[in-house]
Image (spheres, rainbow, N blue to C red):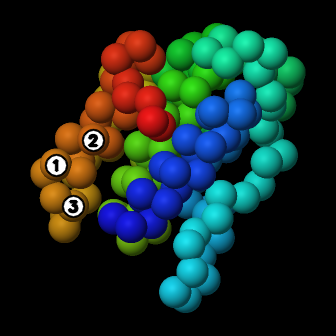
Amino acid sequence: LMMCEQICHAMCEMASAGVLHRDLAARNILVQSMQPVHVSDFGLARRLLHVGSAAASTGSLVPVRWSAPEVLRTGAGWSEKSDVYSYGVTMWEIFSNGAEPYANRSDVEAAEAIVGGERLPRPKDCPHQVYALMRDCWHQDPARRPSFQ
């Protein structure tokens, strides 16, 4: 849980600075023994002109299994709330011991499931309250997702 809190804190700092990560996933979290985790890989990151606005994709690859439904539908719609969606998937990865989201599906099938409202199951040893937070992060309506604050 501490890792999730540290990731949230880092993402809060980014959101406050008007930066979208757009590729938040466990593979982009650097972990060292007894040290705070670090969010890395800003290759898809973009700065927003206005905090709270949305950004469009510029033809870059989309990390399908971690992307919010609005991003998968349009290729646009990147916002803090789409990073919140990815944060929920990253939490799921952590509580699933690094399992790949939608592992038994192709990217196309995973995208169809996400856009259709299907969400990842509760990991075996994940507390119900933590899974409830994941589900909040995955809300179909971006406005109903929590912020990193």
Residue 109 location in percent, x, y? 49, 33
Q: CA distance from mark 2 to mark 1?
A: 6 Å
In the picture shown, does residue 34 fall above or below 7?
A: below
Kindly indicate the quadrant of the structure image that contains residue 16.
top right
Residue type at tag 1: Gln
Q: Is residue 34 left or right of residue 114?
A: right
Residue that appears at 42% across and 58% down: 4
Q: Is residue 28 left or right of residue 89?
A: right
Circle 3 packing at 10 Å, graded few (<14), some (14-19), many (20+), is some
Quadrant of the drawing holding the N terminus: bottom left
Residue 49 location in percent, x, y? 80, 15
Disc 3 versus disc 1: nearer the observer: 1
**Which disc, if any, is residue 36?**
none
Disc 1 secondary structure class:
helix
Circle 1 packing at 10 Å, graded few (<14), some (14-19), many (20+), is few
Disc 3 secondary structure class:
loop
Q: Is residue 18 left or right of residue 135?
A: right
**Which disc, if any, is residue 126?**
3
In the picture shown, does residue 143 fall above or below 96?
A: above
**Which disc, if any, is residue 129?**
1
Kindly indicate the quadrant of the structure image that contains residue 115.
top left
Of callouts 3 and 2, the N-terminal one:
3
**Which disc, if any, is residue 133?**
2
Label pair 2/1, CB-CB below 8 angstroms: yes
Residue 22 location in percent, x, y? 68, 36
Disc 2 secondary structure class:
helix
